[in-house]
Image (tube, rainbow, N blue to C red):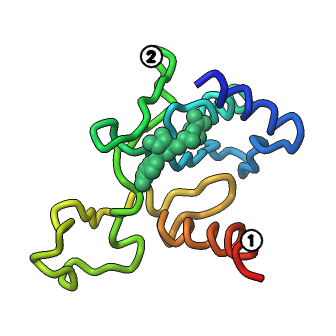
Amino acid sequence: MQTMRRTGLDMHRKTGAFTVPTAPGATTRILDICMAPGGFTIAALEKNPFASVDAITLPEQSGGARYHLPLGEKRVTVLLGDLTMFATEFGVVEAEVPADHPDVAEFVYERPFVGREYGGFSLESGVGKWLMRLVQTWCWPMVTF
Ligand SMILES: C[S@@+](CC[C@H](N)C(=O)[O-])C[C@H]1O[C@@H](n2cnc3c(N)ncnc32)[C@H](O)[C@@H]1O
C-alpha cells in the first residue's frame, strides 16, 4: 500500500493528478476503480482531506488484493465486486443471459454509484460506460496502428 501511495504522491507532484475540480459548495467525490491495496485512495485523500472516495475492488476470495485503510477511516466506501460482472453497465440485459451460462450466478445487474458526480464528471451513464470510454481514449490508440 505504501508503494502505491508513494507512486500516487509522485504522480501528483509531477502532474497534479489529485487536484480534483469541484463545484463551489459541493463535496469532492473521488471514484477509485480497482482500489486495493489502496495507495492511490490514501494519496488522493491526503491531497483532498475533505473529499470522500467511492471504491470498487475485487474481493480477496476471488483473487483480489487485500485493501488497507487507516483504522476508523470513514471517508471511503468500498464496494467489493468484480467489475467485469456488472452486466448492466456493459449493456447486458438479464433476460438475455441463458440460464445455463457458466457464470449466470456471478452477473450483477445493479449499477454501482450511478448518478454520482466525480470531479465535475457525472457518472450518469454508469461505471461500465465510463470504463469503456477510458479504454477507447487511452488504450485503443495504443493498440491500433
Ligand atoms: C495494481 S492493483 C491497484 C493498486 C491500487 N490502485 C492502489 O493504489 O493501491 C490492481 C487491483 O485491481 C483489482 N482488480 C483486478 N481485477 C479486478 C476486477 N475485475 N474487478 C475489480 N477489481 C479488480 C485487484 O484485486 C487489485 O486490487
Q: How many marks?
A: 2
- Determine which quarter of the picture holds residue 99: bottom left
Name the residue type under label 1.
Met
Query: Which mark, residue 15?
Result: none
Q: If the image is split into quadrants, where does the N terminus sit?
A: top right
Q: Is residue 40 above or below residue 118?
A: above
Residue at image coords 34%, 49%: 81
Dot 2 alpha-carbon crowd within 10 angstroms: few under 14, some 14 to 19, many 20 or more: few
CA gap, disc 1 and disc 2: 41 Å
> Which residue is found at the position 51% from the left and 57% from the top?
116
* Residue 93, image x, y percentages: 27, 81
Label 1 belongs to which residue?
142
Left or right of 80: which side holds 8?
right
Q: Is 85 or 122 nearer to us in this picture?
A: 85
Looking at the picture, how far across and down is residue 40, in whole percent?
Answer: 64, 35
Q: Is residue 55 visible?
A: no
Seen at 41% across and 70% down, the residue is 89
Q: Quadrant of residue 6?
A: top right
Which mark, by number, is residue 72? 2
Q: Amino acid at mark 2?
A: Gly
